[in-house]
Amino acid sequence: GTSFGYNTLVSDMRGIPIMKETGYPVCIDATHSVQQPGGQGTSSGGQREFVPTIATAAVSLGVAAVFIETHPDPDNAPSDGPNMIPIKNLKSLLADLIMFDNVAKKIH
């Protein structure tokens, strides 16, 4: 992502088809894409509620892989907690991503 405004990263989805043109697999880092550098003053913050949005958009565009950080208790994780999703939510998210991936493979 690119830094934008008030400690927010922007993931420009136009980059996915551009990178795919190289012929190499493209991976989206869905959790670091929602990171807010310096967002908590002395450390980075994050908006984990948008991880599914970023991941779904990327999978719909045909990425080959999705990187997702998860933790049993993200609020107490030693690092990157604000952008991690709780492990209890991972199975449902992966099921949704597989569904979108199957559709994307038929289109792309």
Image: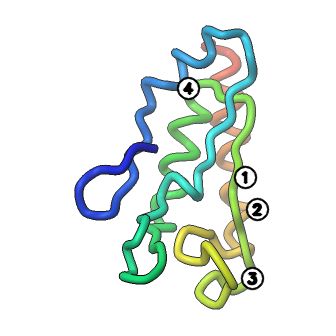
Circle 1 or circle 4, nearest the eye = 4
* Residue type at tag 2: Lys
In this view, the residue in front, 66 or 93, is 66
Quick check: 89 above or below 72? above
Q: Nearer the viewer, mark 3 or mark 1?
A: 3
Judged by depth in the image, the label closer to the viewer, 3 or 2, is 3
**Residue found at the far front of this picture:** 42
The residue indicated by pointer 4 is 61
Q: Picture quarter containing residue 37?
A: bottom left
Residue 91: which numbered mark, if any?
2
Query: Which residue is denoted by mark 3 in the rendering?
Result: 72
In the rendered image, the vertical position of residue 92 relative to residue 16, given as above or below: below
Q: Residue 23's mark?
A: none
The residue at which mark 1 appears reads as 94
* Mark nearer the N terminus (1 vs 4): 4
Q: Quote the CA–CA distance across marks 4 and 2.
A: 21 Å
Is label 4 in a helix, a strand or a loop?
Answer: loop
What is the three-letter code of the residue carrying label 4?
Answer: Leu
Residue contact between numbered discs 1 and 2, judged by CB atoms under 8 Å? yes
- Sooner in the amino-acid sequence: mark 3 or mark 4: 4
Mark 1 element type: helix
| Gap between marks 3 and 1 measured at Cα | 16 Å
